[in-house]
Image (spheres, rainbow, N blue to C red):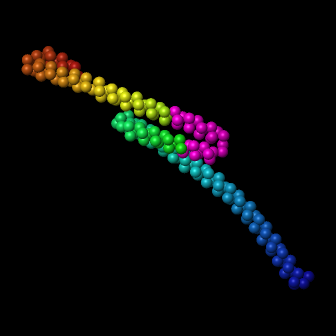
């Protein structure tokens, strides 16, 4: 075999090896790309579920603040947070592949809708009860306290120890 044929055969072997390596690399690149796409989807799901959890915690905190302050802005923030949680869950639902996870998110969405409706009802009822308290109960209590103070004043002036003892018992 002449040198010319050895060089040609060597060149052909190198080209076959190069083509084989390129094919293997291309196939592995496709596999890596698929894995990266799966990772990207899973990472997005993780972020969405974390955002949902944060929105639900914010809802709970704002609801507790509303119980203390009776400020409509607090409960409005709670409802807005529920709506955010619904949005995150709906976006996550589009990325889900497992049927059990899809069912879980759908059930969560139903619960979130119920929770939002209950928050609105709670707001309305508590604000109404607070209004009734402010308009009816508190003025009556203020009037009773004023009258009791009058009785204490009259009892002191008259030296009526029994009246003062009765008032003292009521205050306790």
Judge whether residue 100 is colored magenta: yes
Left or right: 105 in relation to 1? left
Span colored in magenta? 88-114
Judge whether residue 54 is colored magenta: no
Q: Is residue 53 visible?
A: no
Out of 160 and 97, give the one closest to the viewer.
97
The extreme bottom residue here reads 3
Please give the name of the residue rendered at 41% of the width and 31% of the height, measured from the top-left corner. 124
In the rendered image, the quadrant that contains the C terminus is top left
Left or right: 75 in relation to 24? left
The extreme right residue here reads 1
Considering the whole magenta stretch, tell me its main secondary structure. Answer: helix
The extreme top residue here reads 162
Please give the name of the residue rendered at 30% of the width and 28% of the height, measured from the top-left corner. 134
Please give the name of the residue rendered at 29% of the width and 24% of the height, measured from the top-left corner. 136
Left or right: 60 in relation to 50? left
Q: Is residue 161 above or below residue 126?
A: above
Q: Position of residue 151 (x, y in %)?
A: 15, 19
Q: Position of residue 32 (x, y in %)?
A: 68, 59
Q: Is residue 83 above or below residue 117?
A: below
Q: Position of residue 129 (x, y in %)?
A: 36, 27
Please give the name of the residue rendered at 42% of the width and 39% of the height, measured from the top-left corner. 76
In the rendered image, the quadrant that contains the N terminus is bottom right
Q: Is residue 149 above or below residue 105?
A: above
Out of 83 and 68, give the one closest to the viewer.
83
Q: Position of residue 73 (x, y in %)?
A: 38, 40
Q: Is residue 72 visible?
A: yes
């Amino acid at each position: 075999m002449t040198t010319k044929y050895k060089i040609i055969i060597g060149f052909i072997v190198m080209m076959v090896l190069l083509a084989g390596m390129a094919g293997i690399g291309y196939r592995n690149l496709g596999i890596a790309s698929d894995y990266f796409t799966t990772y990207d989807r899973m990472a997005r799901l993780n972020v969405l579920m974390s955002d949902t959890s944060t929105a639900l915690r914010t809802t709970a905190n704002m609801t507790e603040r509303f119980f203390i302050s009776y400020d409509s802005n607090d409960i409005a923030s709670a409802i807005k947070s529920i709506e955010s949680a619904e949005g995150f869950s709906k976006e996550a639902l589009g990325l889900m592949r497992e049927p059990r996870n899809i069912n879980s998110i759908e059930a969560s969405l139903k619960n979130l809708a119920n929770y939002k409706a209950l928050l609105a009802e709670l707001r309305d009822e508590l604000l109404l009860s607070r209004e009734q308290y402010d308009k009816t109960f508190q003025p009556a209590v203020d009037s009773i306290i004023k009258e009791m103070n009058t009785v204490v004043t009259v009892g002191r002036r008259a030296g009526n120890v029994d009246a003062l003892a009765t008032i003292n018992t009521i205050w306790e």
